Amino acid sequence: MKRRILALMLSVLLLSAIFTGCGGRTIYTDPDAYVIGEDITVSADTMLHIASIIESEGSDVNRPDRGHGFYIVRFRFTNNGNSVVELHEQDFQAVVDGVIYRPIDGRMGFVPDKMPATQEVAPGETVSTRLVWMLPRGGNLLVLEFSPDFADQDIRINMYTVD
């Protein structure tokens, strides 16, 4: 009998951890959004691939505000069309629990391959670059949105839970 009670208690704890995530909070995802690692058709001639996201404490010169972290998104963008395509930092935004955050403008010494404010992508070219956000920790949902003028759709990517 004691074994059954112990097994039942352990099962309840495991199910609780699965459904609430670490720290006792619920983890959400957008069921209609893409996920990291997918190739996403932006338009007939362009493709976006979100390769990874990492959290950083920055450097001695660049530190996030208290309760925040730097989140670095590495992505590839391919232009299979016949004309130059321009990517703009402001075509991207992160949404944490419904609050919109824009990428950090300008250079970040600890991210040498950070995308400039405007990135031209020539026909037949693929660029690999990164964007940086300062986001609050403790949110339950982090979604990256990409909405350039040339897109056939607004793109939403589930990134992961912000701890």
Image: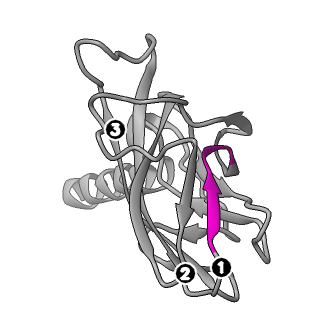
Residue placed under numbered mark 2 in the picture: 123
Mark earlier in primary sequence (3, 2): 3
Q: Judge whether 59 appears above or below 17 on screen.
A: above
Q: Is residue 89 left or right of residue 7?
A: right
Of circles 3 and 1, the one toward us is: 1
Mark earlier in primary sequence (2, 1): 1
Image quadrant holding the C terminus, namely top left
Q: Is residue 129 left or right of residue 138?
A: left
Residue at the image point whose x is 38% and y is 41% from the top = 22
Q: Residues within 10 Å of mark 2 (few under 14, many from 20)?
A: some
Residue at the image point whose x is 63% and y is 87% from the top = 82
Q: Is residue 85 magenta?
A: yes
Q: Residues within 10 Å of mark 1 (few under 14, many from 20)?
A: few
Q: Which residues are magenta?
A: 84-90
Q: Position of residue 62 (x, y in %)?
A: 34, 17
Q: Position of residue 77 (x, y in %)?
A: 49, 70
Give the residue type that dot 1 points to. Ser
Q: Are marks 3 and 1 in contact (CB under 8 Å)?
A: no
Residue at the image point whose x is 64% and y is 35% from the top = 102
Residue at the image point whose x is 43% and y is 74% from the top = 126
Q: Position of residue 31 (x, y in %)?
A: 67, 69
User: What is the secondary structure assignment of the residue under circle 3?
Assistant: strand
